[in-house]
Image (cartoon, helix red, strand yellow):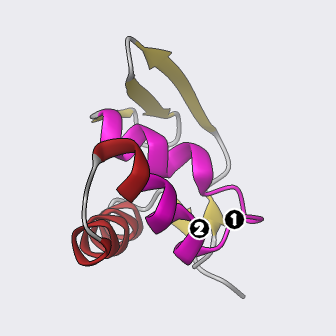
Amino acid sequence: MGSFKAGLTYRDLDGELIVLDAATGYIHQMNPTGALIWRLLDGGTSIESIETRLSDEFDLDAEEARRDVLGFVEQLQRAGLLEPIA
């Protein structure tokens, strides 16, 4: 999956997450679902564990949680917020 790009600053704001990419100047706002996934993408939590946590937290079935997690990770990669695995 990769790791977070260097130079990112983020703040929790009432359940949402604001991420500033200092290199590009872009600000990314994440809803509570994205904020939870972001916090769990620490390199030590498996995708399956993140899906389970998301399912429990937001009362989603396993397939919905999987789609949300994988879709969010894909968005992070497209936005350049995740460094690819070397």
Q: Amino acid at mark 1?
A: Thr
**Most common SS among magenta residues:** helix
Q: Secondary structure at mark 1?
A: loop
Query: Which residue is disc 2 drawn over?
Result: 49
Q: Position of residue 68 (x, y in %)?
A: 27, 65
Q: Amino acid at mark 2?
A: Ser
Please give left or right for residue 57 compared with residue 23 in the image: left
Q: Position of residue 70 (x, y in %)?
A: 35, 74
Q: Is residue 39 magenta?
A: yes
Asked whether residue 59 is in view, the answer is yes
Q: How many marks?
A: 2
Please give left or right for residue 60 compared with residue 52 in the image: left
Query: Which residue is disc 1 drawn over?
Result: 45
Image height of 20 relative to 73, above or below? above
Q: Closer to the camera, 23 or 17? A: 17
Q: Position of residue 7 (x, y in %)?
A: 64, 41
Part of the protein shown in magenta: 32-54
Asked whether residue 28 is in view, the answer is no
Q: Closer to the camera, 37 or 26? A: 37
Q: Position of residue 30 (x, y in %)?
A: 31, 36
Image height of 49 relative to 36, above or below? below
Please give left or right for residue 40 compared with residue 62 in the image: right
Screen quadrant of the C terminus = bottom right
Screen quadrant of the N terminus = bottom right
Circles 1 and 2, Cβ within 8 Å, touching? The answer is yes
Q: Closer to the camera, 83 or 74? A: 74
- Name which residue lies at 48% across and 56% down: 81
Q: Residue furthest right?
A: 44
- Name which residue lies at 46% across and 51% down: 37
